[in-house]
Image (cartoon, rainbow, N blue to C red):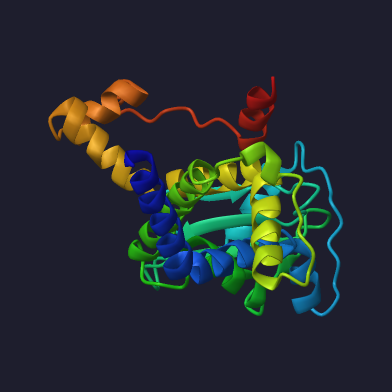
Amino acid sequence: MKRAASQRVMNDLHLVVGVILGSFVFIVCFAGALSVFKAELGYWERGGRRIEFSDVTNRIDGLVFNALHSASVDFSKPVQISLPAMDDPIMRIRFYDTNTGRVAQIGLDPSDGATISEDNIRVAKLLKRIHTDLVLPKPWGRYFVGFLGLFLTLSVVTGVLIQTGFLKSLKTLRPLRQTRAFFLDVHRLLGGWALLFHLLVAFTGALLGLNKLLVVLAAVGAFNGDPAGRNEALFGQQPKVSGEVAKMETLDRLVMSAHQ
């Protein structure tokens, strides 16, 4: 009797989670699948100009200097440099613009350092935002997507628990003339054979979406709400300002050291 009651609770929970959140999960996953082709979408939106991958070894300092010498860069804040890769051959430099007070980005063709405008790259950026936060205000959109991953994990787990013959369901497909039974079998087949994939996507999505909340909770639980103590435990003591001008290493040497 207790087993039947718990089975009914699991079944209802699986149904409710699927009905309420299924459409949101589909939108997030579909946008994520399309975002895999962000480089190809970028070529299309740029009007067909294709950027070939080029190794920037020993050329990083020159490319960055030429790109930033006329920009209004706030060097008191971080400057992020993304090196070209085979799947995304554009070199990007992100920095805080002193004129606008906002983050600006410059795209470069790594072969000749020519500036690439990405202002019209709207579809790829929109798909990425749909996948990460459903175009909702930050950071609440990211948290919502993280909770979607959490509920998808719950749906996967309860879907397995409500199966009385899980292994048998992996090879059962009743004829189409029994419409409800047919689609139920298809649901079980797709969910069962892709179980590990669904669980991986759901669990990692929940971690990526809720990581900031998890870090705050960890700080509260392990360090009595002291973020400084948390940072020191994770990253070591912060260097002290000596007041002396330090020798600046070149970007090329830093990258070479990282590769060694």
**Is residue 34 at least partly visible in the picture?**
no
Q: Quadrant where the C terminus lies?
A: top right
Residue at horizontal 30%, vertical 38%? 215
Q: Is residue 138 left or right of residue 106?
A: left
Where is residue 196 drawn, in percent x and y?
A: 63, 40
Where is residue 31 drawn, in percent x and y?
A: 62, 67
Residue 228, picture quadrant: top left
Residue at horizontal 45%, vertical 66%? 21
Q: Is residue 234 left or right of residue 23?
A: left
Q: Foreground residue, 128 or 14?
A: 14
The relative height of residue 221 versus residue 46 in the rendered view (above or below) is: above
Residue 244, picture quadrant: top left
Q: Quadrant where the N terminus lies?
A: top left
Q: Foreground residue, 99 or 150?
A: 150
Residue at horizontal 49%, vertical 46%? 162
The relative height of residue 141 versus residue 2 in the rendered view (above or below) is: below
Where is residue 77 drawn, in percent x and y?
A: 38, 51
Where is residue 241 drawn, in percent x and y?
A: 27, 29
Residue farthest along the left direction in this orientation = 224
Q: Foreground residue, 153 or 8?
A: 8
Q: Is residue 122 left or right of residue 149?
A: right
